[in-house]
Amino acid sequence: MMRYKRSFYTRESGLSLLEILIALGLGAFMLLGVLSLMASVSSTRTKIAETSDQIENGRYALQLLSDDIALAGFYGKYHPGVGVATYSLPDPCADASTITDLGFSAGASITMPAPLFGFKAGATLPSCFAAEARTNSEVLVVHRVEPQSVTASAITSTNIPYLQIADCDTGAQFVLSSSAVDLNLTLKDCATLSEAWPYVVRSYFISPCEDCSGSGDGKPTLKVNEFRNGIVSIRSLVSGVEDMHFSYGMDLNLDGGPDCYVNDPTEDAIPSGCSGTWNVADWQNWRNVVTVRVSLLVRGLNIGGGDSAKTFDLGRSGSGGVSVRSGPFSDGYKRQVYSTVISVPNVSGVRE
């Protein structure tokens, strides 16, 4: 009789449908969490980058203004001294086509451009940049020469105005001219031509657009109307600068330090908080500005993070000295105020 050997097979059990669904659900939940975390990190990184850009724009704008204001009134090796010269307030749109429009005179009565002067909010602005300026933008105009001089003997006929100072006491103390023939003042040996400095005028203002062609791009921008190398042109400096306010430190006792700060040195009556000699002639008050307090309202370039209830203090004051704040804004942009006080050493230094 044949005997059969019985085989036993091991039965393998798999996952049930329910277990598979549970595993897929947990995996999807974990994946959703990872995606949510990545989106949050990406959003946070974007906000940090935008905040960093906003801070950088504010600091950079202040640095640009600080560097130029610190050089205001730098006229090479020449300074007439306190009370010697009459200071002019020439049109910032003037160019080298008429040298006398630039505000220099070396005759019996010395006249030089004020180191700086400004236009308050609401004033009629110069024609060469009024069309690009924001409504009620304040303006600061800086007069100076380039820090780097050139050799007068190397200058050819040009439309660039140069300031040349005489060390040989035989006539005019200085000359401003765009003609090489006129740049004939000499050093102490009365033979060697003196060096010359290119003349510069910069007018800072706020524009509602970086690119103002057509209807404009809507990006508020700090701009400068610059007379340099004989050409008047407008340049964009820093995007996102939405508002700007200047307060001027007035040295009324001529000791080199600010005695009070005013929003408008052209006021006829002495402003509240000031004591000392206040002049009716605008140029006499502008020559007494020894410091400038600059406040900038800088806006983010993208919508997000803005507080619709927040207002911003740039240091403006209205009637009765009441503070005038900017805002609130309901457009969703994040904003921040950046401020600094800048000395004008070419004015204060000779008074100390």
Image: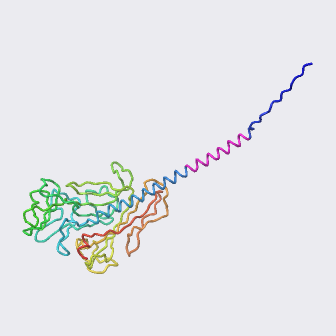
Q: Position of residue 24 (x, y in %)?
A: 67, 42
Please tell me which residue is depicted at 32% across the width and 54% down the height of the picture.
236
- Please indicate whether residue 143 sits to the left or right of residue 195 in the image: right
Q: Seen from this angle, which residue lies furthest right? A: 1
| Residue at the image point whose x is 31% and y is 66% from the top | 120
Identified at 8% across, 68% down, the residue is 171
Image quadrant assignment for residue 313: bottom left
Residue 36 drawn at (x, y percent): 58, 49
Give the quadrant of the N terminus. Answer: top right
The image shows a total of numbered marks equal to 0
Answer with left or right where residue 18 lies relative to residue 237. right
Say left or right for 12 vs 65: right
* Quadrant showing the C terminus: bottom left
Residue 177 drawn at (x, y percent): 13, 59
Image side of residue 96 versus residue 9, left or right:
left
Looking at this view, name the residue that lies furthest to the top: 1
- Colour scheme of the rendered structure: rainbow
Residue closer to the observer: 189 or 241: 189
Q: Nearer the viewer, residue 277 or 37?
A: 37
Q: Position of residue 326 (x, y in %)?
A: 42, 65
For the record, the magenta segment spans 19-38
Residue 250 among magenta residues: no
Examine the structure image and report whether residue 27 is included in the region drawn in magenta: yes
By secondary structure, the bulk of the magenta-drawn segment is best described as helix
